[in-house]
């Protein structure tokens, strides 16, 4: 494992899962940690319901989505502009994230 790598903890239905990822935030100085939450189809797709993500200070919802999609499969299957709520309020891609924010990825639903 190279310099700047960190262990991230995922919560999967069967318990904690650990995954190594390359930390990019050290290139930008200060960073913030947010918790990404995945529901229904996104939870099934990713195999986890939550993930702690470290981002550079000043990062936006769009930056979080790019970070996740950039991790490759299965995260690359997330839409480029998914419906997202930050701290239980719908958010726009340009909204700035702060340390401790809870970012819920809301999958499309069908109904009738």
Image (tube, rainbow, N blue to C red):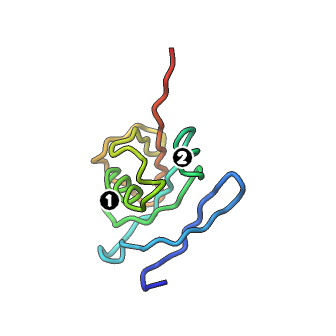
Q: Earlier in the sequence, mark 1 or mark 2?
A: 2
Residue 107 drawn at (x, y percent): 47, 36
Q: Residue at x 52, y 72 (%)?
A: 20
| Mark 2 neighbour density, 10 Å: few (under 14) some (14–19) many (20 or more) | some
Nearest the viewer among 99 and 39 is: 39
Q: Residue at x 29, y 73 (%)?
A: 28
For mark 1, give the secondary structure. Answer: loop
Residue 5 drawn at (x, y percent): 46, 78
The answer to whether residue 42 is left or right of residue 58 is right
Q: Nearer the viewer, mark 1 or mark 2?
A: 2
110, above or below 55, in the image: above
CB atoms at circles 1 and 2 under 8 Å apart? no
24, above or below 58, in the image: below
Residue 73 drawn at (x, y percent): 46, 57
How many angstroms separate mark 1 from mark 2 (CA)? 25 Å
Image quarter of residue 9: bottom right
| Mark 1 neighbour density, 10 Å: few (under 14) some (14–19) many (20 or more) | some
The answer to whether residue 28 is left or right of residue 98 is left
For mark 2, give the secondary structure. Answer: helix
**Count of marks placed on residues:** 2
Give me the disc on residue 59: 1
Residue 30 drawn at (x, y percent): 35, 73
Nearest the viewer among 18 and 27 is: 18
| Farthest top residue in view | 112
The answer to whether residue 100 is left or right of residue 81 is right
| Farthest front residue in view | 73
Nearest the viewer among 101 and 70 is: 70
Q: Residue at x 64, y 64 (%)?
A: 17
Judging by the rendered image, the residue that carries numbered circle 2 is 45
């Amino acid at each position: 494992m190279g310099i700047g790598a960190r262990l991230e903890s995922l919560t999967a239905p069967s318990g904690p899962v650990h995954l190594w990822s390359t930390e990019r935030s050290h290139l930008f100085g200060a960073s913030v940690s947010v918790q990404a939450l995945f529901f229904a189809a996104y939870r099934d797709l990713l195999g986890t319901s939550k993930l702690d993500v470290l981002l550079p200070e000043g990062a936006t919802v769009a930056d979080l989505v790019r970070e996740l999609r950039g991790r490759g499969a299965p995260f690359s299957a997330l839409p480029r502009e998914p419906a997202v709520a930050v701290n239980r309020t719908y958010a726009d891609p340009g909204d700035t994230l702060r340390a401790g924010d809870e970012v819920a990825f809301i999958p499309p639903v069908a109904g009738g």
